[in-house]
Amino acid sequence: MKFISEETIELVKRVSVYEVADILGFHLKRVGTYWNIKCPNPDHYEKTPQTYISMSTGYFKCYSGGGCGADGNVINFFSWHYYGGYDPKKDFVRSVEGIATLMGIPIKYSDGSISQDNTRPVYVPKEQPKLVEIPAASPDVCDQTYRRFLDLCPVFNEHLEEWLGPKRQYTKEQVEVIGLRSVPKTVDQAKKIVNTLISEGYQIERVPGFTQFLRKDGRLENDQDWYWLIAGMGKYYIPIRDDMGRIIRLRIRTNLEDNKKYVWFSSAPMNKGNFIRRGGAGSGAPVNVIVPSKLMALWQPGTEITGILKVNKVLIIEGEHKGYIVSEFLNMLVISIPGVGNFRDVIPLLKKWGVQEVAIAYDIDAFYDEKKNTGKNENVFKQLVRFGKALISEENIHSELWVWNPRDGKGLDDLILGGKLPIVINLRTNERSNLVLQSK
Ligand SMILES: [Zn+2]
């Protein structure tokens, strides 16, 4: 038995629904960033065509009467048109062959044979459509909108219990000052909050996380068929502040317990054909500037932190809660980065503040042995050491690494909440010592 080669499948997948619909004689009407066509499902009679091909993702979806189920990529489109549905077992191969024949793509098989119509010009793949990125509103606008938004959001008991409980040990004052809030549980609750923001005159367009959805049976070209709502579900929001104390983004603690525990409150265009939303902006991945809550309460949004704090030493840490917890307990300025790849993003801030000392904390075994192969940990460790040493040699900033025994706590927050302190590795001398606390 011979199979179609991966190469041919990939080429076919690069054909857009638009191209195939055009060749098959569909009438394509442009509506904003979508193509409006009639549903490819032969059993679906529509009075008014309400199937759309997204220009940014290249996917299509039927919306007529709530949608007949026809949606997806070019292979799905071809299959719905010719076979009235899509069953991967039955329809994948014949649809790939059908599109290839239609477009003049040679079909290569696993046994080396090629099926090609030589009377046609060879298909040249078109450029993939790019997602249209909408720039986010200014930090001042985001700050004003997010602050009011968080005011309007509920605080559910189960979240308060987590924040005040033994794992986090926030105080009620801290929860207020930081601005931790629960994600609205129902669409109605979310709609009410968003409508309040709008009626009070807050800008929500291009503030990441707010987006417009199309009403059921709504039409893309009718502005009144679109309504504003929030993107993303989850447990609660964690505010992210810039170096001027402005809340510029929100993180969402999701309902998941795997590696997607935290996501951005973001309304960037999604690479899924099933969503139609507009007016939103992406979050990017900014760093979070954190000071102890008594200083944060004094910090006026839009002003430099140096106005209320002499910045000598900064701790850089990865993670959402860790930064807040450690800043409070160690009474220091913390920059929390969203991922280990974002270390370099902090350098402009360090320079601006004239920072002399940087500590880098990362969940790494203090008794880490460079000779032992530990996989991922090893690479992260090397990356941190390289970054720390670059700070010394390129920026003339003293840098040190904070490490600890993972048995004493998984993260630095767990360690400190458990009453212990990390071990400091001086990256200039490689000497190890115990951390000495700055007096409060
Ligand atoms: Zn349909």
Image (cartoon, rainbow, N blue to C red):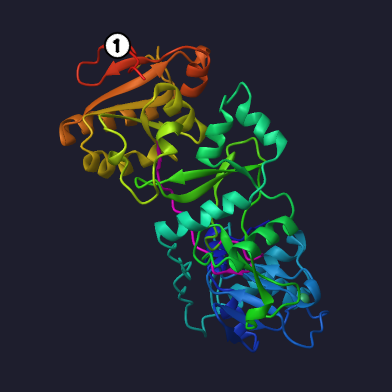
Instruction: Estimate the x, y position of residue 399 in percent, counting from the top left.
Output: 25, 26
Of residue 171 and residue 342, the one placed in the foreground of this image is 171
Of residue 301 and residue 425, the one placed in the foreground of this image is 301
SS of the residue at dot 1?
A: strand
The answer to whether 147 is drawn above or below residue 253 in the figure is: below
The quarter of the displayed image where residue 192 is located: bottom right
* Amino acid of disc 1: Arg
The answer to whether 106 is drawn above or below residue 139 in the figure is: below
The residue drawn where x is 44% and y is 32% is 294
Going by the image, does 278 lie left or right of 428? right
Instruction: Estimate the x, y position of residue 54 in percent, counting from the top left.
Output: 58, 73
Disc 1 crowd rating (10 Å Cα; few below 14, some 14-19, many 20+) is: some
Going by the image, does 47 lie left or right of 335? right
The quarter of the displayed image where residue 373 is located: top left
Instruction: Estimate the x, y position of residue 417 in percent, counting from the top left.
Output: 52, 18
- State which image quarter holds ligand 1: bottom right
- Majority secondary structure in the magenta region: loop
Image quarter where the C terminus lies is top left
Of residue 308 and residue 205, the one placed in the foreground of this image is 308
The quarter of the displayed image where residue 254 is located: top right
The residue drawn where x is 65% and y is 85% is 24
Q: Which residue is mark 1?
A: 432
The answer to whether 429 is drawn above or below residue 276 in the figure is: above
Q: Is residue 241 magenta?
A: no
Please say whether residue 253 is visible from this viewpoint. no
Q: Which residues are magenta?
A: 270-290
Instruction: Estimate the x, y position of residue 229 in percent, counting from the top left.
Output: 64, 62
Q: Is residue 278 magenta?
A: yes
